């Protein structure tokens, strides 16, 4: 009983339902950008475990035509509706959410999209300022790593290395 | 006319047509819930319950469809892109139906605590049911 209580009191969870994920494809012929502001993120600050989820159909592109192709041809969103990341903040103990500062971290875990899971390690930053916690990260992902085939005639329109920017304002989860 | 000329004209015509099609596709407007008849009309609570009890079946049924949903407004806020989110409550304390309005649309006149009807395209389910490209269609719904 005591163990359970102490576990609960040590478990500090932070979350958002309004995380932003933006990706940017910088190819020779075209620059393509899409944003989704409804990503969820849950971070357990006591263990460093972090989880992200996002709905593929919620990505909004500048071009409706590209958005259609993203969902139908490339991501097959009807079959694989979500992209998720489940991982661990490696140096979580060096981050103090009670003290203002900028904390650089490495996050390692499984990124799962288009039905394919891949282990990745990315750089992330936590910024604590006046009780507000923001978390951001920028990294690259190769469509080919996730079984997404870009046909030859689109090679100059879609980058084979997509820039992904992640941003979240985390709120403490009160029990 | 010699063959070269014919080929040249053909190439020009094809290029112009292809360019026209490309321009049309590129500028094709975003699909919004405003212009479409709803695939289903239901309460926020019923929609949430369908997803929370069987997400796979509910997603198969509602994904990418225009849903007309009624419920009590809990919150109205701007998202990170400046679009308006309207949050409807359900009987589940944590479960919501969140509809992001189409770019430029406002929740004009909608008050927190009132019951409204709105339409949105169903994106699926995370911890809430998410709709986007939405519009408020009735903000004076009588209970």
Image (cartoon, rainbow, N blue to C red):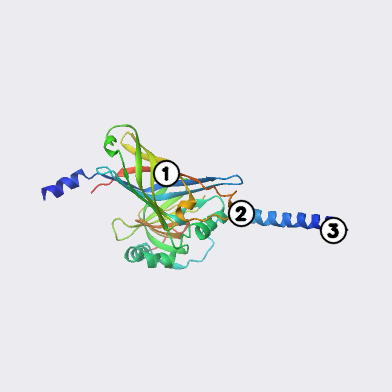
- At 37% across and 56% down in the image, what residue appears? B126
Q: Are marks 3 and 1 in contact (CB under 8 Å)?
A: no
User: Is A50 displayed left or right of A7 in the figure?
Assistant: right
- At 38% across and 65% down in the image, what residue appears? B56
- In the rendered image of this protein, does residue B9 appear above or below residue A7? below
Q: Decide if residue B107 is in sight here.
A: no
Mark 3 on the same chain as mark 2:
no
Numbered badge on residue A153: 2
Distance in Å between CA atoms under marks 3 and 2: 29 Å
Nearer the observer, A171 or A141? A141
User: Is A66 displayed left or right of A116 in the figure?
Assistant: right
Q: Residues within 10 Å of mark 2 (few under 14, many from 20)?
A: few
Q: Secondary structure at mark 1?
A: strand
Q: Chain of mark 3?
A: B
Q: Nearer the viewer, mark 3 or mark 1?
A: 3
- In the rendered image of this protein, does residue B63 appear above or below residue A44? below
- The residue that label 1 is drawn on is A166
Mark 2 on the same chain as mark 1:
yes
Q: Chain of mark 2?
A: A
Residue A48 placement (x, y as % from top left): 28, 43
- At 28% across and 32% down in the image, what residue appears? A99
Residue A136 placement (x, y as % from top left): 39, 40
Label 2 or label 1, whichever comes before in sequence order? 2
Q: Decide if residue A1 is in sight here.
A: yes
Mark 3 on the same chain as mark 1:
no
Distance in Å between CA atoms under marks 2 and 1: 30 Å
Q: Residues within 10 Å of mark 3 (few under 14, many from 20)?
A: few
Numbered badge on residue B3: 3
Q: Residues within 10 Å of mark 1 (few under 14, many from 20)?
A: many
């Amino acid at each position: 009983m005591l163990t359970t209580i102490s576990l609960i009191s040590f478990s500090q969870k932070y979350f958002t339902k309004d995380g932003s994920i933006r990706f940017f494809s910088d190819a020779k012929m075209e620059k393509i950008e899409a944003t989704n502001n409804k990503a969820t993120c849950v971070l357990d600050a006591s263990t460093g475990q972090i989880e992200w989820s996002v709905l593929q159909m919620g990505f909004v592109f500048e071009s409706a035509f590209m958005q259609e192709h993203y969902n139908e041809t490339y991501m097959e969103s009807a079959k694989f509706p979500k992209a998720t990341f489940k991982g661990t903040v490696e140096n979580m103990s060096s981050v103090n959410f009670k003290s203002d500062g900028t904390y650089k971290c490495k996050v390692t875990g499984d990124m799962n999209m288009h039905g394919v899971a891949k282990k990745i390690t990315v750089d992330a930053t936590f910024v604590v300022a006046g009780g507000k916690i923001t978390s951001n990260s920028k990294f690259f992902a190769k469509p080919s790593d996730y079984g997404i085939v870009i046909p030859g005639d689109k090679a100059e329109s879609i980058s084979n290395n997509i820039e992904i920017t992640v941003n979240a304002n985390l709120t403490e989860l009160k029990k | 006319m010699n063959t070269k000329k014919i080929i040249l004209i053909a190439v020009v015509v094809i290029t112009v047509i292809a360019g026209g099609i490309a321009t049309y596709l590129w500028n094709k407007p975003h699909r919004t819930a405003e212009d479409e008849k709803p695939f289903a009309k239901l309460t926020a609570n019923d929609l949430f319950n369908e997803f929370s009890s069987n997400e796979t079946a509910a997603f198969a049924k509602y994904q990418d469809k225009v849903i007309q949903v009624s419920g009590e407004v809990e919150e109205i806020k701007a998202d990170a892109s400046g679009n308006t989110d309207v949050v409807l409550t359900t009987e589940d304390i944590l479960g919501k139906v969140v509809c992001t309005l189409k770019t430029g649309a406002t929740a004009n006149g909608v008050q927190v605590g009132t019951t409204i009807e709105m339409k949105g395209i169903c994106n699926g389910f995370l911890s809430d049911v998410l709709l986007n490209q939405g519009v408020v269609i009735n903000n004076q719904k009588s209970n």
